[in-house]
Image (cartoon, grey):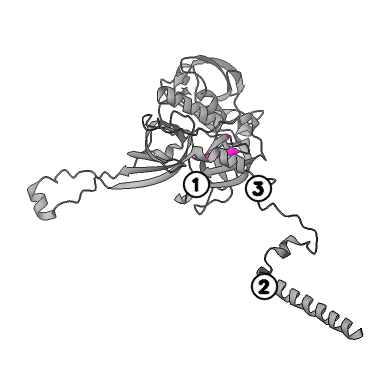
Amino acid sequence: MRRLWLIFAQTVTVSLAVLFVVSTLKPEWLGKTLGNSPGIVALQEAPSAGEPVIATGSYRDAAKKALPSVVHIFTSQKIRVPRHPLIDDPLFRHFFGERPDAEGQTTSGLGSGVIVSPSGFILTNFHVVDGADQIEVTLNDGNNLNARLVGGDPETDLAVLQIDPEKIKSLKLPAITLGQMDNVIVGDVVLAIGNPFGVGQTVTMGIVSALGRSHLGINTFENFIQTDAAINPGNSGGALIDSRGNLVGINSAIYSRTGGSLGIGFAIPISTARNVMEQIIQSGSVTRGWIGVEAQEITQELAESFGLPDADGALIAGVQRGSPADVGGIKPGDILLLVGEQSVKNPQVMLDLIASQKPGEMIPFKLRRQKTLFDTTIRIGKRPPLRRERE
């Protein structure tokens, strides 16, 4: 009896030793048997089959909703070399030979855009398509289509493209849902979608870091959403969406010393983009108010030297001759305090308030001249188009 007990004990010991060695070095030899057996400690595992379970904190639904609406934009521009005035002179050709003609060569660029209408309208950045001779968009499903420039607004860096309506009759373009800026708050999660560095459609996540960023020197009219969602070259014109997949901004610029993302990106809010887009679609351009002044910020030092009660307002540094401001009696050195009933805090606010006025309307202005307050009424003019220098 004792002998049988020793044999049993040795068999059990050897079996456990073999099981330990196999489970440690070659667990695949055990197949699924071990996986289905109770573990050493209680563990919670995701289901291996059936309907996928959305993880807490996942934004897959938002990405799935918005991704089809974001397109890649490819542009080409012909290189035009000025023709030499003596190129047709036989004597010139004899000594200098045939001058190579660069006409027809092209440079290319890329960016992103957002489908905002089933009619084929696409919202993007103006700098993405500026000067392009040909524009091609690639849809999320791989279709390549030509697009035309409906109009652009370099002062907000926005442009509207349209795909040929005949080309999209057989396609159902997935237009994005526009969000509401009133619902966007600092700290909200946002996703940036675009084509960074041309690697393909990419989604990055961050939060709204700040709202109303201006004085950056990027555009004439600035009211940026700042985000730490990675925005890189090629993302320009792409979508900034909220956690529900609604468009809240158009990715526009980054702050970077190296050309890569440093966690400070800027997007044009949808409120601005929608206003510009609707004007471009309706008339091909954007109409803004203008009075013909140059203004500078009132620093604390200037306020003290002028004996001002505070630094609010915009100091008029120059007045264009014959402009609405000149006709209305505004002079250099005046301080603009009110446009209509709205306070002017600084030159950027002044610019935005005047631009929002309708040309032709009579608007009251309140100013300070030296230590005297006075009122005047000015007929708002139409802001002239921005002159862009080309190399």
Front residue of 55/371: it is 55
Task: List x then y, in percent, for residue 324.
Answer: 45, 19
Residue type at mark 2?
A: Lys
Q: Secondary structure at mark 1?
A: loop
Can residue 270 be seen?
yes
Mark 3 nearby-residue class (10 Å; few <14, some 14–19, many ≥20): few
Find disc 3 in the rendering and name its residue. 50
Residue type at mark 3?
A: Gly
Instruction: Locate the N terminus by quadrant.
Output: bottom right
Q: Earlier in the sequence, mark 3 or mark 1?
A: 3
Q: Which mark is residue 26?
A: 2
| Image quarter of residue 242 | top right
Front residue of 244/134: it is 244
Q: Secondary structure at mark 3?
A: loop
Task: List x then y, in percent, for residue 73.
Answer: 42, 42
Q: Which mark is residue 201?
A: 1
- Residue 55 lies, with reference to residue 223, above or below; the image says below
Residue at 55%, 41% in the rendered image: 266
Task: List x then y, in percent, for residue 340.
Answer: 58, 18
Q: Secondary structure at mark 2?
A: loop
Mark 2 vs mark 1, foreground winner is: 2
Q: Is residue 237 magenta?
A: yes
- Residue 79 lies, with reference to residue 19, above or below; the image says above
Residue at 41%, 20% in the rendered image: 322
Which portion, as a residue range, is magenta?
234-246
Can residue 215 be seen?
no
Q: Is residue 96 magenta?
A: no
